[in-house]
Amino acid sequence: MNFEYPRGATPLDLNEAQGLLLSHIGTRAELDRWEQENISEAEDRVFRRRQKDVLTEKYARALHKKMLGNVWRWAGNFRRSQNNIGIEWMQVPVALHQLFDEVDGWLEYGAYPPDEIAARFHHRLVAIHAFANGNGRHARLMADVLLVHLLGRERFSWGQENLTNAVEFRRRYIEALQAADSHDYGPLLAFVRS
């Protein structure tokens, strides 16, 4: 499996790539299609009924498994290697617990407006980069679950106004995350509802 990765994507190491459950996949487009089908099924399930204990490691892992478990053997398990982005892999569980506690505080005290809570949560979850693959998609769905089930709001649109240009979409998304790295959440807040 020698796929070309789009700008900002995390390449899989050899051990992770060997976790592919579907041996017939030979191109990045085929992998994307199978992953997206699995993710769509997960989305249907999580928005069909109320989700409990969303801000927990158990939920985050279970959601990742629902999203990618039909494609990757390691789905739902934290990464065990150092990627080109993200915190040290050994620190993932602690960082997630800290993030979930912090978001609980934001919710309890109304620290930010609902969209900003979800956008900040998404940004931090992406920065932690808990899994070998699917971190951006997982963080987007986690933010949407937070919005719908804990904040009583509509899901983000995530730049879907213009899906005809995936390269432009990805560029805007990465730039918005990079601005948030510098504590400027304006571009991310604009992107999530565009």
Image: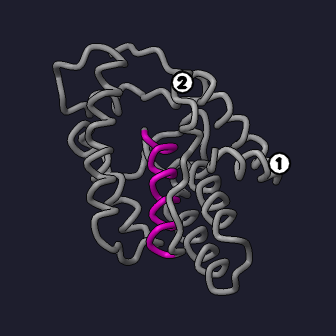
The quadrant of the picture occupied by the C terminus is: top right
Q: Pointer 2: residues within 10 angstroms few (<14), some, or many (20+)?
A: few
Relative to 153, does residue 9 appear above or below in the rendering? Answer: above
Residue 105 position in % (x across, y down): 65, 81
The residue lying at 72 percent from left, 41 percent from top is 176
Please state if 139 lies on the left or on the right of 70 as rendered: right
Residue 21 position in % (x across, y down): 19, 33
Relative to 140, does residue 134 appear above or below in the rendering? Answer: above
Which element carries disc 1, helix, strand or loop? loop
Q: Amino acid at mark 2?
A: Ala
The residue lying at 74 percent from left, 40 percent from top is 178
Give the residue pinned by disc 2: 166
The residue lying at 63 percent from left, 56 percent from top is 124
The quadrant of the picture occupied by the N terminus is: top left
Question: Which secondary structure is most common in the magenta stretch?
Answer: helix
Say which mark, if any, is on residue 109: none
Please state if 33 lies on the left or on the right of 113 as rendered: left
Please state if 102 lies on the left or on the right of 16 as rendered: right
Residue that sits furthest to the front in the current view: 161
Relative depth, front residue between 184 and 157: 157
Q: Amino acid at mark 1?
A: Ser
Relative to 84, does residue 125 appear above or below in the rendering? Answer: below
Q: Pointer 1: residues within 10 angstroms few (<14), some, or many (20+)?
A: few
The residue lying at 76 percent from left, 45 percent from top is 187
Q: Name the image colouring.
A: one colour
Give the residue pinned by disc 1: 182
Relative depth, front residue between 36 and 130: 36
Q: Over which residues does the magenta segment extend?
A: 134-150
The quadrant holding residue 133 is top left
Which badge, 1 or 2, comes first in the chain's sequence? 2
